[in-house]
Image (tube, grey):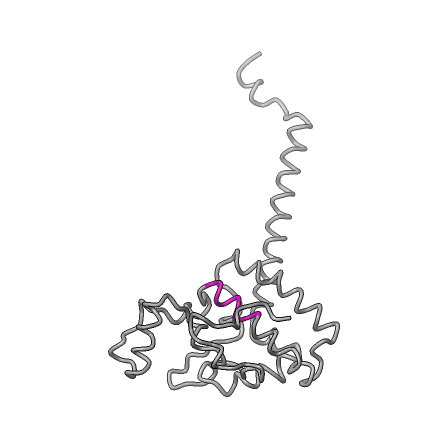
Amino acid sequence: MSEHSKTSAPKSPVRRATWLILSVGIVIGIIAWGGFNTAMEATNTEQFCISCHEMKVNVYQEYTDTIHYSNRTGVRATCPDCHVPKDWVHKVVRKIQASNELFHHFKGDLDTPAQFEAHRFRLAQNVWRTMKRTDSRECRNCHDFDSMDYNKQESRSSQGHQDAEEAGLTCIDCHKGIAHSLPREYDPEQDVPGKSIFYTRSE
């Protein structure tokens, strides 16, 4: 048998089936990944966050009165900027955790401002605890000790930031309530930076 006839022999049905399955799998994988990524991005916008009325009428309204919403530089930090990690792995973990929030949304646990206020302290502590555990990771997307020029800050802020850096504190240790109203149960006397009681799990 010549070399030509060896190379031009038809492929076996098993090989053809293998290549077909592999090709179909790759196409399905690309489509699935694209759909998943599109869904991730669609749920990572401020408009999506405030599509739940309990967010729009409560925390969003408070946020619009803060410097993170409107300021002299025109740089706005939106809901996902502060509450959703940038890196993919932590973002997916956060999205999975958010499924619990959707459960309570559909259950109607926070349906009215009164219901929201009844749960505000617990919800705030959950966020504070997470931010403490992650070294205020989302804050550091915009704010970082390494990028601060203490000479350009007011003397009180400059000294506070330098003291915090030396003490190993993180943003949330000193900046609770910067974007949303503090719960009525919050007591600043119990929130000594580095010794706060508010990172413990509430009952």
Specify the farthest residue to the bottom: 65
Where residue 144 sits, quadrant-wise, is bottom left
Specify the farthest residue to the right: 107
Q: Is residue 7 left or right of residue 163?
A: right
Instruction: Count numbered badges in the picture.
Output: 0
Nearest the eye: 191 or 95? 191
Where residue 153 sits, quadrant-wise, is bottom left
Residue at (56% x, 21% y) in the render? 7
Where residue 142 sits, quadrant-wise, is bottom left
Measuring from the top left, give residue 141's x and y in whole percent: 42, 68
Nearest the eye: 184 or 69? 184
Measuring from the top left, give residue 72's x and y in whole percent: 38, 86
Is residue 127 one of those drawn in magenta? yes
Instruction: Judge whether 100 appears above or below 118 on screen.
Output: above
Work out which quarter of the rendered image holds the N terminus and state it.
Answer: top right
Specify the farthest residue to the left: 151
Instruction: Judge whether 181 appears above or below 91 on screen.
Output: below
Measuring from the top left, give residue 5's x and y in whole percent: 58, 18
Residue at (26% x, 80% y) in the render? 152
Is residue 194 one of those drawn in magenta? no
Work out which quarter of the rendered image holds the C terminus and state it.
Answer: bottom right
Dominant secondary structure of the magenta stretch? helix
Residue at (62% x, 60% y) in the render? 96
Measuring from the top left, give residue 179's x and y in whole percent: 50, 80
Instruction: Judge whether 69 appears above or below 127 on screen.
Output: below
Magenta stretch?
126-134
